[in-house]
Image: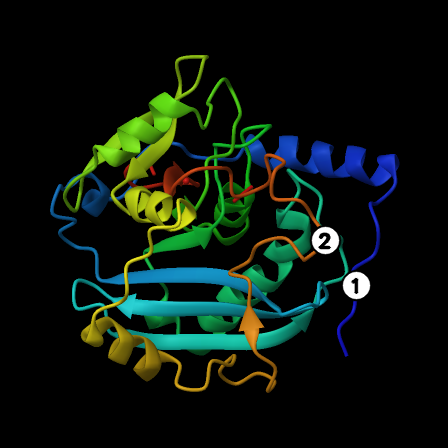
Amino acid sequence: MAREAAGRPPEETLLLWKREQAQLKARVVDRDTEAWQRDPAFSGLQRVGGVDVSFVKGDSVNACASLVVLSYPELEVVYEDCRMVSLTAPYVSGFLAFREAPFLVDAVRRLQEREPHLMPQVLLVDGNGVLHHRGFGVACHLGVLTDLPCVGVAKKLLQVDGLENNALHKEKIRLLRAGGDTFPLMGGSGTVLGMADIRSQDYIRRTLGVPRAPTPGQERSRKAQNPRGVCPKGGSEEATGEGRPPEGHSTQEPWDKGTGGAKLDATKTGCPTSAVRQ
């Protein structure tokens, strides 16, 4: 049965969360610390991980927390951990980590205990990093707690520090033509908070109602990766939502994934190329 998460926490809790964010933010390493990070070809990079919390349709409590590790550059799955979890903290814009990060940290720790030789050298996180109301999104949070380089990958632009999803921003996205094309997301403070990449253009196409059907190869690949559309090793309920806030929350507010295209925002402790959900 679908369940709803608790309502907005009291202001005292939000103040404690802000204080914890500030303390952890002081431990962020915002420079390249690994040799492969400084190599344009990423020479030495062998394992890339990705994490996400996907919600059961119509349910803001039951979700699937996933960690997948791929070999690089082959991009073959070498490890996966997907578990059904019950989220107790409510969704609050700017505090996504307090709702989802504990389950993702647990997944990374299980990997460390079971098969440490498969630990990823970088972790892609469904959400923002430094592109955040207080400069410390879920990707930063996870990077500090796991001591892994984390790259936040958000589908939409979080409008902070003067960044706007306006006509100029959308035109820049439309000008992205080839794989690897990017442009910096520079805030009003002059700080580059992330990069918009070619996938942003695909997002704009979809949101403008000009969908492109997947090729037969893409469709076969999609079915092969998840033939039943369920959380592997989890329950039988369909996992959907791609980590977005539960139904009932407006996506018009500047929530943890931002507004207008796939954004990359480098964050950690030891993050790779500037790239970042809150």
Circles 2, 1 touching at the beta carbon (< 8 Å) = yes
For disc 2, the marked residue is 248
Q: Amino acid at mark 1?
A: Glu
Q: Amino acid at mark 2?
A: Gly
Q: Residue at x 51, y 76 (%)?
A: 82
Tell me the quarter of the image containing the N terminus.
bottom right
Tell me the quarter of the image containing the C terminus.
top right
Looking at the image, tell me whether mark 2 or mark 1 is earlier in sequence order: 1
In the displayed structure, does residue 259 sit left or right of residue 263?
A: right
Who is closer to the viewer here, 11 or 243?
243
> Disc 2 and disc 1: Cα gap in Å?
10 Å
In the displayed structure, does residue 125 sit left or right of residue 54?
A: left
The quadrant where residue 197 appears: top left
Q: Is residue 178 above or below residue 213?
A: above
For disc 1, the marked residue is 4
Picture disc at residue 14: none
The quadrant where residue 238 appears: bottom right
Circle 2 crowding by C-alpha within 10 Å: few under 14, some 14–19, many from 20 = few
Q: Residue at x 86, y 35 (%)?
A: 11
Q: Say what secondary structure mark 1 lies in.
A: loop
Q: Is residue 108 above or below residue 1?
A: above
Q: Is residue 6 above or below residue 11?
A: below
The percent coordinates of residue 121 (x first, y second) are 32, 56
The percent coordinates of residue 50 (x first, y second) are 40, 61
Who is closer to the viewer here, 201 or 262?
201
The percent coordinates of residue 242 (x first, y second) are 51, 61
Q: Say what secondary structure mark 2 lies in.
A: loop
